[in-house]
Image: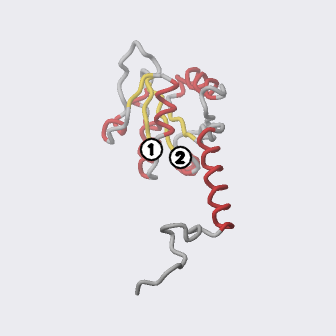
């Protein structure tokens, strides 16, 4: 049993990883570090909102184009009547995203289409957050956000980005 020499990894018997594998490992490690420090990845985010709040939603979209925000929202707005064809289209659009942001304004909680979009997002296993449009108001939160315990944020780019990055 007590052999001499040999190639174990304990005491200078040579590298445990063949040089080609070591090179691949180092390259993968470098790529991972570059991805962590490189430009932020694009997020596909579904934004649920009441049409009366579209101007504020457009402001969020414009802010997202700023390189400091670190992400870009894809516009998946569904501008059709709330019927079965709309639901089918909306289901498909939500499926293309990684999460849903509900922009909470004065009448958002009462909008049947918004509540349906939120329930569909949960059904598809998407992360959902609520963002209050107005800091000085306490507008009602849509029932699906309350039922599922969604994070409710005030409109703050760093907080929104933090929730997007964690999901």
Label 1 vs 2, first from the N-terminus: 2
- The numbered disc on residue 70 is none
Residue at (53% x, 78% y) in the render: 5
Residue 108, x across and y down, in percent:
43, 28
* Residue drawn where x is 43% and y is 22% of the image: 154
Q: Nearer the viewer, residue 46 or 52?
A: 46
Query: Label 2's element?
Result: loop
Callout 2: few (<14), some (14-19), or many (20+) C-alpha neighbours within 10 Å?
some
Residue depicted at x 64% and y 44%: 34
- Does 20 appear above or below 165? below
Asked whether the residues under the numbered discs 1 and 2 touch, taking CB atoms below 8 Å apart as contact, a structural biologist would say: yes
In the rendering, at what x and y percent does residue 83 appear?
Answer: 52, 45
Q: Position of residue 1 (x, y in %)?
A: 40, 87
Instruction: Residue 76 in the image: state x and y as whole percent.
Output: 61, 40
Q: Which residue is mark 1?
A: 127
Position of residue 20 in the picture relative to residue 122 (left or right): right
State left or right for residue 97 relative to residue 102.
Answer: right
Choose top left, top right, bottom left or bottom right for residue 45: top right
Which residue occupies the foreground of this view, 90 or 160? 160
**9 above or below 118?**
below
Q: Which residue is labeled 2 in the image?
A: 98
Q: Secondary structure at mark 1?
A: strand
């Amino acid at each position: 049993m007590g052999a001499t020499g040999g190639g174990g990894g304990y005491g200078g018997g040579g590298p445990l990883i063949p040089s080609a594998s070591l090179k691949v490992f180092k390259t993968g490690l470098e790529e991972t570090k570059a991805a962590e420090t490189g430009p932020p990845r694009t997020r596909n985010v579904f934004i649920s909102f009441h049409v009366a709040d579209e101007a504020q939603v457009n402001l969020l979209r414009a802010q997202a184009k700023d390189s400091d925000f670190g992400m870009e929202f894809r516009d998946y707005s569904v501008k059709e009547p709330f019927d079965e064809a709309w639901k089918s289209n909306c289901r498909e659009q939500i499926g293309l995203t990684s999460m849903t942001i509900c922009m909470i304004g004065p009448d958002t909680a009462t909008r049947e289409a918004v509540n349906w979009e939120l329930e569909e997002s949960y059904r598809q296993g998407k992360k959902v957050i609520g963002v209050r449009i107005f800091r000085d108001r306490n507008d009602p939160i849509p029932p699906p956000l309350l039922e599922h315990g969604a994070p409710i944020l005030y409109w703050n780019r760093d907080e929104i980005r933090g929730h997007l990055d964690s999901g």
